Amino acid sequence: MKLIGSSSSPFVRKVRVVLIEKKLDYLLVPEDVWAEDTRIVESNPLGKVPCLIMEGAEALFDSRVIVEYLDTLSPVGKLIPSVGRERAETKTWEALGDGVMEAAVLARLEATWKGRTKAQRSQAWIDRQMQKTRDGLNAMERGLGEKPFCTGIHFSLADIAVGCSLSYLDFRFPELAWRDDHPALAKLYEKLAQRPSFADTAPA
Ligand code: GSF
């Protein structure tokens, strides 16, 4: 399998962590979707990464679809419960982690994307997205509580999505200092960072 992506994307990282946790072999094909000569639309018409090219050459996107597929490929370390409330709970955690990443990415793009002039950048939009980021962090802290992992005693996709969102904030918004007000998340993140899947995929 080939994974098209960049090492700075938190969504790509989520997929890479899953590949490593599931002990699946893959080749990372670097792609800068913001470069003029990007050919990402040949694989994903939406022009986004991650995009997984399966054996047989069909493409899969987006990260939620990819990780769900990968979890079915091997019985090693099941990351998403198969049915019922537990499955919905895990996927809601994933949506929360993804939502924090998405809001933070949108805030950063508003401030930095070269396609906008200074006059076109909207501070109100950045504030709106950063509020979502903070609200998401607060919800994750409350939801985690005293539990060892997001959904209870087992490591799952919920922790991967949350961990990737936290490390993206460290990477792009260190001034947010999220650890100060979120001690439970800080403890979880310390534990996650020790897993080879996280240690080997740090954003760059
Ligand atoms: C989000 C992917 C995404 O925004 C997913 O795969 O889960 N819901 C999707 N990818 C960004 C890179 S990043 O900020 O992680 C992307 O490829 N953006 C290009 C664009 O044109 O928006």
Image: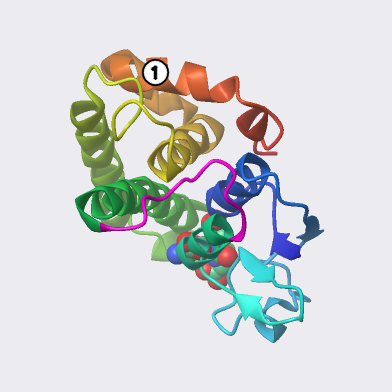
Q: Position of residue 16 (x, y in %)?
A: 64, 48
Tell me the residue at 35%/23% (across/down).
185
Q: Position of residue 55 (x, y in %)?
A: 76, 74
Reply above or below: 97 against 70: above
Secondary structure of the residue carrying tag 1 is helix
| Residue visible at 39% across and 52% down in the picture | 98
Quadrant into which the C terminus falls: top right
Q: Viewer-proximal residue, 70 or 48?
A: 70
Tell whether 155 sits left or right of 69: left
Residue 93 as seen in the image, left or right of residue 2: left
| Residue 132 covered by magenta stretch | no
Residue 78 vertical position relative to residue 34 in the rendered view, above or below: above
- Residue at the spot x=35%, y=46% of the render? 100
Where is residue 9? Give x, y as percent: 59, 51
Quadrant for residue 54, please give it.
Answer: bottom right
What amino acid type should be assigned to the residue bearing mark 1?
A: Ala
Report the magenta stretch's main SS. loop
Q: Which residues are magenta?
A: 73-83
**Residue 28 falls in which quadrant of the image?**
bottom right
Residue sitting nearer the eye, 117 or 201: 201
Q: Which residue is mark 1?
A: 186
Residue closest to the eye, 188 or 170: 188
